[in-house]
Amino acid sequence: MVGQMYCSSGSPLARALTRALALALVLALLVGLFLSGLAGAIPAPGGRWAHDGPVTPASRSRSVLLDAATGQLLLVDGRHPDAVAWANLTNSIHETGWAFLELGTSGGYNDSLQAYAAGVVEAAVSEELIYMHWMNTVVNYCGPFEYEVGYCERLKSFLEANLEWMQEEMESNPDSAYWHQVRLTLLQLKGLEDSYEGRVSFPAGKFTIKPLGFLLLQLSGDLEDLELALNKTKIKPSLGSGSCSALIKLLPGQSDLLVAHNTWNNYQHMLRVIKKYWLQFREGPQGDSPLVPGNKLVFSSYPGTIFSCDDFYILGSGLVTLETTIGNKNPALWKYVRPRGCVLEWVRNIVANRLASDGATWADIFKRFNSGTYNNQWMIVDYKAFIPGGPSPGSRVLTILEQIPGMVVVADKTSELYQKTYWASYNIPSFETVFNASGLQALVAQYGDWFSYDGSPRAQIFRRNQSLVQDMDSMVRLMRYNDFLHDPLSLCKACDPQPNGENAISARSDLNPANGSYPFQALRQRSHGGIDVKVTSTSLARILGLLAASGPTWDQVPPFQWSTSPFSGLLHMGQPDLWKFAPVKEVGIVMKPG
C-alpha cells in the first residue's frame, strides 16, 4: 500500500492547507499569478466553479487524433473511430464515492504515440479532478508556501539524475523490452502533463520530465523513503503508521479464491478513480513483437496518476497484484538509495504488470534496479494456476515479494496458502531476513508485539476472523471491520484511553481522542484510516471485475463527515461531506480496441 503520500498518516504530500490559504492560492491562479517555488502551483482549469472547486461534468468522452498532414495530435470530443487514444470519465464521487475512467489506445499506431496520447486524453477528461487532487495533496510540497528548501533541492537533484540515467539506459538498450516499457511509462506521464498544461506536442526523440511536476503525483510511496534517505528534517513520517491491509482467502473446499485490499490513507486523498486501461502496447520496440500480457488492467487509483499507488490491480494476464507497505526502519540501509542504477518503484510496478504472465516472472522483472524506495510486501496471485474445487497445484498460485533497500526476497507461498487457507498482509515483513534487516527488532524490543509479525493487532484479528469469510459479502465485512470500542484485540494497553481506532483491519484514527496519551504517533488522533475496500474472485477476475467501496468504514462506527470532524478545516475540494457509500460492482473492460 502506498507509503506516505497515499496510505499513511502525516502524508508528505498532504501538508494541511487550510481553506483560507487554499482560497488565496486559487485567487492568485485565477488572476494569472504563478507563485514561486520548486513545485508550487498548477494552472486552474476553465469552466464553471462551485464553492468547493471547479465543476466536473457527470460524464465526458474525448479522443486524440493524428493529423496526417501536420503530424500533430488533436483533441476532439466523443469517441472517434480513428483515434490514437480515447477515454471516458464518469464522475459519481458524490453518489458512490468513485469516479470511473475507461481509456483505450489503437494498435494501428506505434507504441510511443499510443503512450503519449493515452496521457493526453486522460488529462483531457479529468482535468478538474486532477486540479482538486493536486490542491488537496500536493500544492504545498516543495512550494509555493513554506517548505524545506535544502531537502527540496536535494530531491530535485536526485530526480533529475535518476531521469537522466534512465534516459541513458533507454538509448543504450534500444532493443530491450524492459527499457521500451520504461520509455512508454514516461511518455504517458509526459502526455498527461503536456495535455493539462495545454501544450500537446509529441516528442519524436529525447524528452524531459519535470522533476517536481506531475511526477510528484506518481512518486507517492517512493517519497516516504526518499525523505528519509535525503535527510528531510521537518514533519517526518509517523512511527508505526499503517499503510493498508490485504487478505487472500481460499474458501472451503477450494471453491473460490478471493483477493481483497483496503487502502489506508490521509482523508484528503479521497478523490478516488477506478481506472480501466486497454493499451495496445507491444512487449518490445520491434514491429513483430507480441502485445504485452498485461495490456488490459483495472485498478484503484487517483486523479493524475497512471498507476494504482494503493496498490491493487486486476490484469488481463490472469494476475492480480497488490501490496502493503513494510517500510524501512534501519538508517544504515539508506546508502543503497542512489539516483543512478535504480528505477523508482512506481515505474518498476508498471513494467512488471505489463510484461509478466506469472508470479515468478513478475518478481524477476520487478526486482531489477531496486530503488529501495516504496518498500512493500507484494502479493502476486495467478488465477490461471488456481483450479476451483481442486487440490493445491503446489506452486504458482501465490508469490510473495518483499523489498527493502539493498534486498529483495521472493518465495512461492502456494502450499502455505492451501495449508492455512489464507494469507494476510498488514505492513510487517513475513520473511525473517527482511524483518531483521529493516530494523523492526528494535521496535519490538521498545514497544512490544505491536510491531511483530505474529502478535500485531491486525495479525491477531485476521487469524481469528478469517474463517468467517464465506463469500464476497463476508470478505467485504472483514476488510471493513473496526469494532475498536468493543474488541479486546484493538486495545492499546499503553494508551489512555486503551481502545484505539488504529488497531483494526480498516483504521479510523480520526476517532481517537485528541487529548489521549499514546506511546507513538500512529496511535494518536489523525485524519487517517482505511479509505476503501476492493475485492475480486475467480469469476470476477476473469472479466477484470471487482466489488469496491469508497470512504472510511462505517460498519461498527459512525460514518466520517468532514463538517463534524476535528479536521473540517483541511482542504478537501470535490469530496462529499458525508462518506456513507455501499459497495459497487464494476465489471472490467467494455471498450473495443482500435
Image: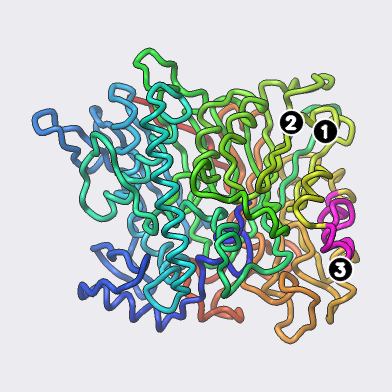
Task: Please give the name of the residue rendered at 68% of the width and 61% of the height, measured from the top-left corner.
Answer: 553
Q: Main secondary structure of the magenta part?
A: helix
Give the number of the disc on residue 491.
none
- In reply to whether residue 367 is colored magenta, the answer given is no
Is 193 left, or right, of 254 in this rendering? left
Q: Tell me, yes or no, whether the two marked residues, 2 and 3, touch with CB atoms within 8 Å.
A: no
Cα–Cα span, label 1 and label 2: 8 Å
How is the model colour-coded? Answer: rainbow
549 relative to 528, above or below: above
Q: Which residue is mark 3?
A: 446
Q: Kindly state the secondary structure of the residue where label 1 is placed.
A: helix
- Quarter location, residue 143: bottom left
Cα–Cα span, label 2 and label 3: 33 Å
Task: Please give the name of the residue rendered at 48% of the width and 59% of the height, measured from the top-left corner.
Answer: 271
Q: Tell me, yes or no, whether the two marked residues, 1 and 2, touch with CB atoms within 8 Å.
A: yes
Q: Count the marks: how many?
A: 3
Q: Horizontal and vertical percent for residue 298?
A: 52, 38
Closer to the chain start, of discs 1 and 3, is: 1
Q: Which residue is mark 2?
A: 398
Foreground disc of the pair 2, 3? 3
**Residue stretch rendered in magenta on the structure:** 441-462
Closer to the chain start, of discs 1 and 2, is: 2
Q: Which residue is mark 1?
A: 417
Q: Kindly state the secondary structure of the residue where label 3 is placed.
A: helix
Q: Horizontal and vertical percent for residue 194?
A: 27, 49
